[in-house]
Amino acid sequence: MTDRRNSSRRSQAWFGAQGRSGMLYRSWMRNQGFGHEVFDGRPVIGIATSASELAPCNAHLTRVAEAVKRGVWQAGGLPLQFPTMATGETLMRPTAMLYRNLMAMEVEELIRANPLDGVVLLSGCDKTTPAMLMGAASVDLPAVMVTGGPMLNGKYRGQDVGSGTHVWKFEEDLKTGRMTEEECFFAEGCMARSDGHCMTMGTASTMACVAEALGMQLQGSAAWPAVDSRRTETAQAAGRRIVDMVEEELRPSRILTREAFENAIRVNAAIGGSTNAVIHLTALAGRVGVELGLDDFDRLVREVPTLVNLMPSGTYLMEDFCYAGGLPAVMAELLGGGLLHGGPVTVTGRTVAENTAPAERVDSDVITPLDAPFQPAGTGIAVLRGNLCPDGAVIKQSAASPHLLTHRGPARVFDSPEAYHAVADDPGLDVDENTVIVIRNAGPKGYPGMPEVSNVPLPAKLLKAGITDMVRVCDGRMSGTGYGTVVLHVTPEAAVGGPLALVRDGDPVVLDVPGRALRLDVDDAELARRRQEWTPPAERYMSGYTWLYTQHVEQADRGADFGFLRGGRGHEVPRDSH
């Protein structure tokens, strides 16, 4: 084993200190049973874990942390586990997205304030992964991500069912009488039958793959199921690897380059990933000073086909994806077609091309080849512009209905998601299949937190008539497990005076995805008159974190981060108060 003792390590400002200060730091740590020899200058590795029973996707991460510790000890480091908050979308209200920035702040400050030389980030649910990456990037100490892995495939009456995706399907079946309440209650337990995050290509799976595509996670590790022994093998390997990364001074700033972000954007298109990746990647890029705009998400994916046949866009689930070759197989296909940069360095110390060289595509129905893709090039996320979204909006084409990608229809406007839900089952609701449902005041400031409410269920009377999709437009987000022809992230949001605030019932809304346009067919003079009549909503929060959030959150096109958190703040050792 290489002797990794180094008196100049960051952690030695604590554990190598002389006199009273050093005695205090070492002696209090020794109440946990550590011998004096572990403070000899070896790398001190933090294990940041978002394990929490309030975040079901993250509840098992304590066991994953034990595997990381084994790896750190094997490599000659000192592992120290610490908790972070867990932002689980399944339980948190009004939305976990409200707390992503708070979690990122906590992760950043915990890393900086403690005697750490490197950190392993353990995440699960969809907001925990970007929050940890954002926090670690701002400190810029060596870091490696270990996501907790997806659940096993759901099983219901002989069929595979996907977490999240089948929630929407079962709700439709319940409303139309195709499923009883007792059957629905039973089906709930069939969707989530093991530890792990959503096993569809929802945001949790998407961000795990994105972390791997960025080079911040060991290759192949995004897809191993949470309960597969190779998930803990991967965690142990990450524990060994972070010790080497400290020695090599391999920091996020060397990994999170412009080319790495371009790779992540193209990978997201190829896997049929979530639109939420746009928000999170933009925010992360802002932390490391990489210029990344909405138009990059459109331009970079026009040549990229959807290769992965997973729900909600396709048929299969993450367990199948894993056994079919996982993300390395997808990246190898893209590299072979000249659609990825092979040169960016990753947490392995090797390049993207070197990592993917041994990859093998085992099942061509789950991971299709580049020359016979699941969906053709240009079916990924599209960025729309127009007088209804001057700063942009997005739509996931692979999850939309092709016949609705070009559509003109009258608006039916609701000032909140709750206002829509209150009347959605009313048989007298004045809508038909051509109506464009507009939901506003669901953006970062307006809700607050930009919840996953945009893909509201169709009105019950249309579901019963056999209508399965209609155009919906919203300044909020959509769960990555969701589907439908839904325009999201309309920016600026209604609450800050965006044009969505000016829409009225009956206004013609024109959606032209091939032309990348979303517009309101109302003349400029009328819109100007309405703007004169518009008044901003009253401030609802005068103190606390939610006040801080609403005062400082940026719009969706900038990642909904706090403006004061853009850029890095480094890892300077705090002053010693002892």
Image (cartoon, rainbow, N blue to C red):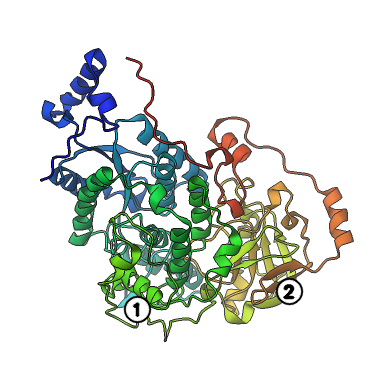
Where does the image place residue 383, in percent across and percent down from the top left?
A: 61, 66
Q: CA distance from mark 1 to mark 2?
A: 36 Å
Say if 198 sits above or below 382 in the image.
Answer: above
User: What residue sits 52% from the left and 45% below the top?
Assistant: 98
Q: Residues within 10 Å of mark 1 (few under 14, many from 20)?
A: many
User: What residue sits 39% from the left and 42% below the top?
Assistant: 140
Helix, strand, or loop for circle 1? loop
Q: Amino acid at mark 2?
A: Gly
User: What residue sits 86% from the left and 49% below the top?
Assistant: 532
- Is residue 93 at all visible to an observer of this figure? no
Where does the image place residue 210, in percent across and percent down from the top left?
A: 41, 60
Q: Which mark is residue 366?
A: 1
- Is residue 166 at all visible to an observer of this figure? yes
Say if 186 sits above or below 534 in the image.
Answer: below
Where does the image place residue 188, in percent across and percent down from the top left?
A: 37, 63
Say if 395 sits above or below 147 in the image.
Answer: below
Question: Closest to the observer: 281 or 436?
Answer: 281
Q: Which mark is residue 210?
A: none
Question: Closest to the observer: 275 or 134?
Answer: 134
Where does the image place residue 567, in percent across and percent down from the top left?
A: 51, 42
Q: Which residue is mark 2?
A: 409
Q: Residues within 10 Å of mark 2 (few under 14, many from 20)?
A: some
